Amino acid sequence: MSKAKKTYPESEVRHRLADEFPGWRFSGGHIERVYRTSGWRSSLLAANAIGHLAEAAWHHPDLLVSFRTVTVRLMTHDSNGITDLDFALARKIEETVGWRPALEGSPLPGTPDNPQYKYLDYDAAPDKK
């Protein structure tokens, strides 16, 4: 069992989310993000990428996988709150799931701008519950 880590008060969590993680929100003691996808296959691909990151980091979020959405919920369970572990994994998830190579000048073209190949709905506003 790991040692409890410093938890952040809700006000600081909300401030950091607003400043650093605009697609994320604080809800029910977790930081949460809903990724909108193009369908079941894309939801599974996103969930598997997040699962890989979580396992490699040894910090495991709750995932809700639906036909057109993947919801990620993070909290450090052994500290019963939001810690640096949650922010670090949220950042890595954002970098990975939101990666668009063509926008950063990469030689990789990225997903074609065609609904047939659309993977994630990058332009959708995050769900507000």
Image (cartoon, helix red, strand yellow):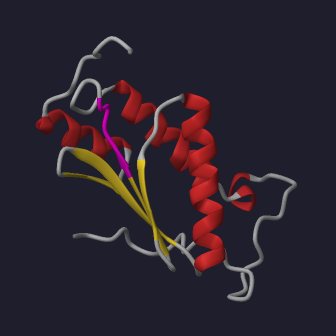
Q: Residue at x 52, y 49 (%)?
A: 94
Instruction: Give the vertical position of 89 relative to 1 (above or below).
Output: below
Instruction: Give the vertical position of 95 relative to 12 (above or below).
Output: below
Q: Residue at x 31, y 38 (%)?
A: 75
Q: In this rendering, does residue 3 appear at all? A: yes
Asked if residue 108 lies left or right of residue 58, the reply is: right
Q: Is residue 89 magenta?
A: no
Q: Measuring from the top left, give residue 66's x and y in whole percent.
A: 47, 74
Asked if residue 14 lies left or right of residue 37, the reply is: left
Mostly what secondary structure, the magenta segment?
loop
Q: Measuring from the top left, give residue 47's x and y in whole percent.
A: 57, 58
Image quadrant assignment for residue 52: top right
Q: In this rendering, does residue 98 appear at all? A: no
Residue farthest toward the top in the current orientation of the protein: 3
- The magenta segment: 73-77
Q: Is residue 76 magenta?
A: yes
Could you say which is closer to the camera, residue 48 or residue 87? Answer: 48
Q: Residue at x 50, y 73 (%)?
A: 123
Q: How many marks?
A: 0
Q: Measuring from the top left, give residue 51's x and y in whole percent.
A: 58, 47
